[in-house]
Image (cartoon, coloured by chain):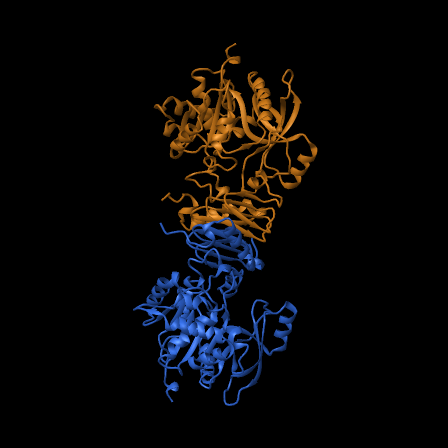
Chain colours: A orange, B blue
Amino acid sequence: MSQNTSQIVPVILSGGSGTRLWPVSRESLPKQFWPLISERTMIQETALRAAGPGFAPPMVVTNHAHRFLVAEQLREAGIEGAKVVLEPVGRNSAPAILAAALLVAERDPDAVLWMLAADHAIADLPALHAAFGRAVAAARQGRIVTFGMRPTAPETGYGYIEAGDELPGLAGAHAVARFLEKPDAATAAAFVAGGRHLWNSGMFVFTAGALIAEMGRHAPEVLAAIRAAVAQRVEDADFIRLDPAAFAACPSISIDYAVAERTDRAAVVPADIGWSDVGSWAALWELGAKDPHGNVAVGTAVLEDSHDCLVHTQGMVTALIGLRDVIVVVTPDAVLAMHRDRAQDVKKVVDRLKADARSEAVAHKPEG
Amino acid sequence: MSQNTSQIVPVILSGGSGTRLWPVSRESLPKQFWPLISERTMIQETALRAAGPGFAPPMVVTNHAHRFLVAEQLREAGIEGAKVVLEPVGRNSAPAILAAALLVAERDPDAVLWMLAADHAIADLPALHAAFGRAVAAARQGRIVTFGMRPTAPETGYGYIEAGDELPGLAGAHAVARFLEKPDAATAAAFVAGGRHLWNSGMFVFTAGALIAEMGRHAPEVLAAIRAAVAQRVEDADFIRLDPAAFAACPSISIDYAVAERTDRAAVVPADIGWSDVGSWAALWELGAKDPHGNVAVGTAVLEDSHDCLVHTQGMVTALIGLRDVIVVVTPDAVLAMHRDRAQDVKKVVDRLKADARSEAVAHKPEG
C-alpha cells in the first residue's frame, strides 16, 4: 500500500494577525514571525517541529503580504523545498487546509497531512512525536484526527473535545463524543474536574483524500469553491497563487465547523505535550523561564523588588521597581504596561489606536 | 544710596544631575534642561521667573559640559546678556554662589543676588514676586534671606526652618529660630501640625557684600579658595571660567552649612508659592494636570481602566491597562515602570546600570 511509505506533508497555516500580542505582533508582522519562545521565530519552530525523516517539505498557507517573510524565515531555518500557497483573502481554516489537501492529492491522495498553526508553542517534542505516531495510524484508517490537550486550568478561551472510547486497533486514539464551544467558567471547571474533556489544539492529521471526501460530504460549497481556486491557480518557482475570484467566493469557515464537528470519522489523540496557543502576554509569562521572584525577562531588564512580572523589550533597557503581576512590553515605537490579569484587553487598546488612525495599531516602524 | 536703585541679579545654580528623574534626566542632560512642567525647559522657566523690569541679566553657574546647553536654552527663551560661570568641578552650592557674589561685587557690592535652583518649579508667580519683594527689603538691611514654604505634607526629604519673630520694620520677614536637618516621619508630622516649621526651598536673597562678609566670618577657607578662583578666572565673550586648581582646593559645602545655619543675620520669608523641587516622578504626578481618573499623561498615551498613574513618553505611544498608582516613563533607549510609592528608588536602578557599565545610566542616545 503506497500510503504507508509516502511521506507526511506538514501544512502550516500562517494566517493569524496576533493582535493580543501587540505591540510586538501587528498585522504587518504578526506573532508567528517573531522569536517569542526561543531564538527562532514561531513559524521556524513550527516548521522544524515537523521536519526530518518521514516528512516531506512543508506547505505553508499564508497571505500575499507575508509571502517573502515566510519564504525567508523558512530559508533561514534551513527548511528546503517548502511550498508557499497564497490565499487571496482570509477565509478561515477550512478553505486554507482544503487547498493544501487538493494540491497534495493531485500527486498522492493517500498522503497524510499534518495541519499546524504557525503560532503555537509545544514544549515536549518527544511526547508530541509519540502522539503524532498514534494520530498517523488513525489517519491512515481514514480518520479525521485531532489532538486533545489535557486541560491544566479551566480556560474559557478554548474549545473542548469530549473523548469517547478508544478506537479498536488504534491504541491511544479515541472516538470523539462531541466538540464543545468555548465554555463559561463553571462549565470549564467541571470539564477540568471530570477528566474526559480535552482542549482542542487546532492541530489535525488526516489523509488528503479523507479531508476532501469529508469536505464534500459536509461542506460541498467550500469544496466547489476551493477546487476552482486550485484548478485556476498560478504557480511559479516560489509561490502558488490561488485564484482570487474563486477563493473569495468561498464561505469563511473553520475546519472545526466545516468538518470536524460534523463527520463520523473524527478521532482524538489525548496528549500531554506542553501545548500553548500563546494567545496573550500572560501566556508568554506562563511559558517563560522565571527568576526566583517569578519574573520573566526577555531583553535587558533591571528588576528591583518586583514579582511575577513579564518584561519583553526589543533593545531598550527596561527597569521595574516595586511592581507585582505587571507586564511591560517595549518596542521602538510603542510601549504597553498592564496588569497580568488584563492581558485579554490588549485588543481594546489596538482598537482605540485604529479608531485614532494611528499606524502603530497595525504597522511596525520602518527600521532606520 | 546706590543699592536701592541697582538691579537685582538672578544667580541660577545649574549643577544637579537629577538622577531621580531617570531615564529622562541623566548626567549628560539633567532635568533642568527638559520641558518637564511646561513647554519650556525648567532652566528656561527659572530664568523667565527672574526676568523683567528691575532684574539684571542672570548669572548661571554650571559645569563645563553643559555650557552650550545653558547658553542655547537661555538664548532660545529670549534671555539676553546672561553670564555663564563655569565650575571646574562640583563643590556644592556655597562655592558656586560665592563665585557669583564675588564677580558681581567687583562692580557693585550692594547689588542684591537672588539665588535660584535651575530645576525647581513654582506655580504661583504673583505670590512669588510678593514674597520676593519682602525678601529684597530684608536683604538690603544686610540679611541672609531664605524662603520658607508652608509644608503641605510631612516630607522627610526636605530640610525645615523654624521661624522666629517677625523682624522689626520688615513685614513678612522673620528671624530664624533654627535650621533643621531632614527629619524622621514623626518629627515631620509634628512640624506640619505645629505650624511654625517651614520647608527650606534653597532659594536665597542677599547682597553680594553681605554674603561675602558672612562667608568670611563662618567659612573663611571657602572664601579664600573662591577669591583665588575668581581672581584667576579666564573670561571670554560667552563664558567665565573659574580657575581649576583654586576652585578644586575649596571644600565641598552647601550654603546652608557654610553660612545660613551659622549666621546671626538669617531671615526667613514664609511664602505659599506652589513650590516643588520636582525631586521625583511622583512629584511630577502631583504637579500634573489630571484626567477624571487621576492620571497624568505627557505624550501619546492610551489609558484603559487605569487610575492615578503617570505616563511620560517621548514620542512612543504608551498604553496602560488595568493599572493603579503606576508610573511609566518612556525614552528612546530606556523605559521605567514603577509603583508610584517607589519613586525614590530610581537611584537604585541607575546605580545598577552604572555598575554594569551601561551607558543609559548617564548618557542619552545620540539622535539619529
Q: Please indicate whether residue B155 sits to the left or right of residue B243 in the image.
A: right
Q: Nearer the viewer, residue B186 or B220?
A: B220
Q: How many marks overall?
A: 0
Which quadrant, please, contains the N terminus of chain B? Answer: bottom left
Q: Nearer the viewer, residue B308 or A221?
A: B308
Residue B271 location in percent, x, y? 51, 78
Farthest residue to the right: give it: A194
Q: Is residue B124 visible?
A: no
Q: Quadrant of residue B70?
A: bottom left
Reply above or below: B220 against A329. Answer: below
Residue B357 location in percent, x, y? 48, 49
Residue that appears at 57% across and 73% down = B160
Farthest residue to the top: give it: A1
Reply above or below: A138 against A86. Answer: above
Residue that appears at 37% across and 29% down = A245
Reply above or below: B160 against A12. Answer: below
Q: Is residue B164 visible?
A: yes
Residue A102 location in percent, x, y? 44, 21
Q: Nearer the viewer, residue B246 or A278?
A: B246
Residue A133 location in percent, x, y? 58, 20
Q: Nearer the viewer, residue A49 or B300?
A: A49
Q: Please indicate whether residue B14 sits to the left or right of residue A294 in the image.
A: left
Reply above or below: B85 against A328. Answer: below
